[in-house]
Structures are given as C-alpha cells and as structure tokens.
Amino acid sequence: MNEIAKNLASIKQTLPANVQLVAVSKTKPPEIVLEAYNAGQRVFGENKVQELVYKYETLPKDIEWHLIGHLQSNKVKYIASFVNTIHSVDSIKLLQVIDSEAKKNDRVINCLLQVKIAQEESKYGFSFNEVEDLLKSSLLNDLNNIKVVGLMGMATFTDEENQIRQEFRELVLFFKKLKTGILQNNAYFVEISMGMSDDYRIAIEEGSTIIRVGSSIFGKRIYN
Ligand SMILES: *Cc1c(COP(=O)(O)O)cnc(C)c1O
C-alpha cells in the first residue's frame, strides 16, 4: 500500500459510520489525488474555484466534489454544473447566486452555512444571529435549487484542546436548537461539517457528521 492509501485506511478505521470523510486535495496535483481515488476515496474537497474546475476536468467523473473555501458569487457559474456541496456559504447573496446558477444547470446544490465559532477575527462566516434571522425569514422558500443541509465551522487555531472542544460543542448545540426550533425538524438539515487534520477526533466526539481532512491524508502542503 502507498502512503496515501495507508493514511486513508487508518483514518477510516476510526470513523463512525455516520461520519463522512471529505479528502481535502487542495494544492495536490491530479496524479496524487488519483492515489486516494484508487484507494477507494470518492469525496474530495477544494478551496479554490480554478483548482476545483481543473481537477474536475482532469479526474474521474464519479468523484463527488465539495467546495470548502470562500466563494465569490461571480465565480459560482464555473462550478454550478458539477459541484455537489458548498461548505462555505457565508452570505445571503451567495445563496441566491448559487440557486440561480444551479437552476440554469437544472440541478440542486447542497449548501452548508458557515458559522463563525473561532475566537480569532475571521473574515468569513455568519454569526449565530445572522443564521437564525436567515432561517426565520421566508427567503429560502423561493430558492428551489439549493438545499441547506447543515452548518460548517472552523475552530480557533490553537493547541488548547478545551477551547477547540468548546467551540465545536457550541456549534452542535446551535445546530440542535435550529433543528428542533425554527426548522421544525426539517429532514434535510442533518450535517455538521467540522474537524480538520489536527482536530477531527475532537470534532467527532462532539458530533461532527463531515470531517474535512487534508494533510493527514496527503502530507504537508507546500504553497508557492
Ligand atoms: C485546508 C482546509 C481543510 C483541511 O486542512 P488540514 O489541516 O490539511 O486537514 C479543511 N477545511 C478547510 C476549510 C480548509 O481550507
């Protein structure tokens, strides 16, 4: 077995059945991504539109592609024909554009609302209040080509395990509050995307349903 297949196997071994693994392949060339594909992985995540499009065009067509990084609304059109899930929806405008581009392609795109849970000033993501206001409004009723399937969050970049755990716990509590409250147990609202290489074990303990793991599968990234 090659290194990537080994890494995948060891992560999957500890994964509860209800938790999905998104293999984050950003910065890795197609031939490396293919090693994970050949080891059985079918769900991959990218954080840049151009790179996502390139890999979609280059790699096997049965890959399920997720966008996990910030998305500018003027770029949605490049991925709307194939992207399965967008984890990083952080504005109402973006939701509306995703819906209209999905409609042009006669598709439904899964969306996760990115929520700010980290202590550090993060540029992107809704506040808890903004998510509540959005879900209370009738805005989503008219968007038939998106499905809001859950929430996404990123914990503070820190070694303090307790803080990371606390942030994940807050996101899960918020998810449950929405699910049983405003959303009246909406059957589509089921996913909590949280946990990366350094903290996915904590995230799973706290109730994550999707982990986004890059370097623990593919090794360290080299940015130029
Ligand atoms: C890069 C990235 C990941 C994966 O990070 P690793 O630490 O390499 O596992 C997960 N989520 C987002 C949003 C990312 O940008």
Image (tube, helix red, strand yellow):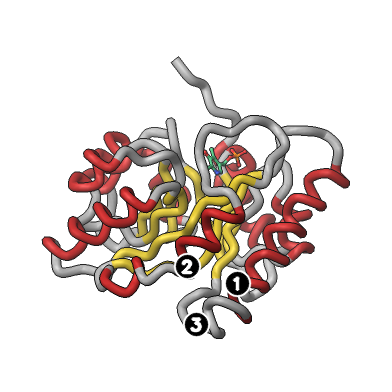
Name the foreground residue: 24 vs 29: 24
Let me know if residue 13 appears in the view. no
Label 3–label 2 contact, CB within 8 A: no
| Ligand 1 closer than 8 Å to label 2 CB | no
Question: Label 1 crowding class (10 Å Cα cut-off): few <14, some 14-19, many 20+?
Answer: many
Residue 16 can be seen, yes or no = yes
* Residue 15 location, quadrant: bottom right
> Disc 3 and disc 1: Cα gap in Å?
10 Å
Ligand 1's quadrant: top right
Could you tell me residue 118's position as x and y percent? 69, 41
Name which residue lies at 49% across and 82% down. Answer: 186
Residue under numbered circle 2: 135
Q: Which residue is mark 3?
A: 186
The residue sitting at 68% across, 58% down in the picture is 171
Q: Position of residue 116 (x, y in %)?
A: 61, 45
Disc 1 marks a residue whose amino acid type is: Leu
Which residue is the site of mark 1?
Answer: 178
